[in-house]
Image (cartoon, helix red, strand yellow):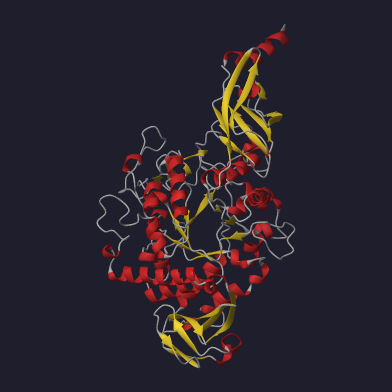
Amino acid sequence: MKKLLLLLLVLLPLLTIAQSITRVNPTNWWVGMQEPKVQVLVYGPQAGTLAYSVNHPGVTLTETHTVENPNYAFLDLTIAPDAKPGTVRLVGRSGNKLITHKWELKARDNRPKGQGVTDADLIYLAMPDRFVNGDPRNDKYADLADPNADRANPFYRHGGDLQGAAQRLDYLQDLGVTAVWLTPVIENNQPLTDEGGTMRSAYHGYGFTDHYTVDKRLGGNAAYLNFVQNAHSLGLKVVQDAVYNHVGINHWFVKDLPSKDWLHQWPSYTNTSYRYQPITDPHAAKIDRLVTTDGWFVPFLPDLNQQNPYVANFLIQHALWSVENFGVDAWRIDTYLYNDQPFMNRCNAALLAQYPNIHIFGESWVNNVVDQAYYVRNKIDFPFKSNQPGALDFVLEGGMLAALKEVGTPGATGWDNGAQRVYQALSQDAVYQDPGKLVTFLDNHDHNRYLSEVGEDVAKYKMGLTWMLTTRGIPSIYYGTEILMKNYKDPSDAEVRRDFPGGFPGDKDDKFTAAGRTAAENDAFNFVRTLATYRRDHPTLSSGQLMQYLPENGLYVYFRYDANGTVMVATNTTDKEAALPTARFSERMSGFTKAKNVLTSEAVTDLNTLTLPAKTAVVLELGK
């Protein structure tokens, strides 16, 4: 009798809760994908207690998996190459009761997708909420966890959206940009969080709450698809910002975990140390590695356990779905070093198998070449070998900023100072399989604004941009850098994420137009446009080989060259005009007798000795 009572206690919840299917992820799939198998997550009250079947030509249910939480089932489907596109009926049976969910199987289309970005591109990074507000009607919704929108509050949402970003693509095209990277557009239905006593919204986009829904404050899925298609129609590529390491505290599956090991669990809350050294340190303690990778990034961003096979499949399939559904071309990965690296290899491999041209570059915020190389295809004998094609080049960014701060000072000519810092960072490129796939930058949404970093010195500003746009790699410029936007992260990130002037109703000035910019802003804009468009139109500068010479007396010279041409970049980092004899560079200059200054269009008729103005980088197209 006691056993019967216990059995009834176990079964009673199953009998009293109505079984149903409320969510299926992926929301759809396609015939003809390179990998014929897809694992479908089925969710709903007691959905895991149903017996499933599928009846659709070419679609086979090979296995059903259940987990700790009876609200989940995972269906392994195999889709034959000759499967028929259409509506697939997923049927769950409980006794005589049938529960049916319609799931669409689509035919693939020929839209551009997974085109990749290369060293021929210039990426423009923008935060959608702070860029352009194209539709004020979607600024806020009362039914979301954060119903606020207030431009007067730097920590709240401001209302920028995808419709607005699409309206300014012509501005980016005119600037010489060839690819657009938006911080994440996926739904962040997050509550305000208390960070240091200040309530902040998730306007940045890094706390996903529903992978298959673009945030409706940005316009939703249709607006994102329209943005990508408009970009492609102008010859611009789109980089999607991926987040695998964590999700938002309000994510629907966090509120009803499939299993305890869906997340990294600790006896008490454990934050990552943010220390990257234990990962590559051959002497590191295991606990230090574990805290780095499995500790939570912050308390309101639960850390996903990618060693759980269902978590891994969910994330990989969402990546494939995003490229196929929206047609994005490249993949920037947030907090790359905190992810499980074997998982990352598997995810990268899946994307590259389906889209061989796609480019993948992750954020591993480190300060040395060895640690940076660990997370990209490299030539070092690490026990783990990454297959990531590219990475954000934090090492070169650090070298350029440190060098620029010493420009015009006695430090510019020091043994390891000034341009030596740039030279030394590049001199270690031998550790990478292909350093040309690294993404170079001078600032971003997590760093001080570039102009502020160089003390608002326009000469230094132009020098650093010249380096970034003429050296190896894929350059990325942060929104507003071209119009001299400035500020520091202290006291908050919001200070480096201010609204683009002219992107919002009621703005006093419209910096998207020459008439709305000051003379200094137009000078900066035209400088960037001149160099960016030259780079876009001259493959020698973007994709040619790089040869650099040891800096001497504060003068730094390098060349980009190929069979079709040679471009010389000569920098004077001192505060005085300097004469540069060129005999030392005969290996690259032999046979050339003249040049054109790319930035001024002036002709140079004598190449024996060049005159370099103080604190200036000169770009010369050599001629015979």
Left or right of 385 on screen, residue 543: left
The one of 86 and 254 positioned closer to us in this rendering = 86
Is residue 417 in sight in this rendering? Answer: no
* Residue at left offset 48%, top offset 92%: 609
Count the numbered circles shown. Answer: 0
**In which quadrant is the N terminus drawn?**
top right
Q: x and y percent of residue 565 in the render?
A: 55, 79
Q: x and y percent of residue 159 in the render?
A: 35, 46
The one of 61 and 183 positioned closer to us in this rendering = 61
- Against 53, is 194 above or below? below
Left or right of 281 on screen, residue 45: left
Q: x and y percent of residue 426 in the render?
A: 59, 73
* Residue at left offset 30%, top offset 49%: 152
Is residue 379 in sight in this rendering? Answer: yes
Q: x and y percent of residue 29 in the render?
A: 59, 37
The one of 595 and 504 positioned closer to us in this rendering = 595
The one of 421 and 599 positioned closer to us in this rendering = 599
Q: Residue furthest top?
A: 1
- Against 604, is 344 above or below? above
Quarter of the view holding residue 171 = bottom left
- Against 422, is 5 above or below? above
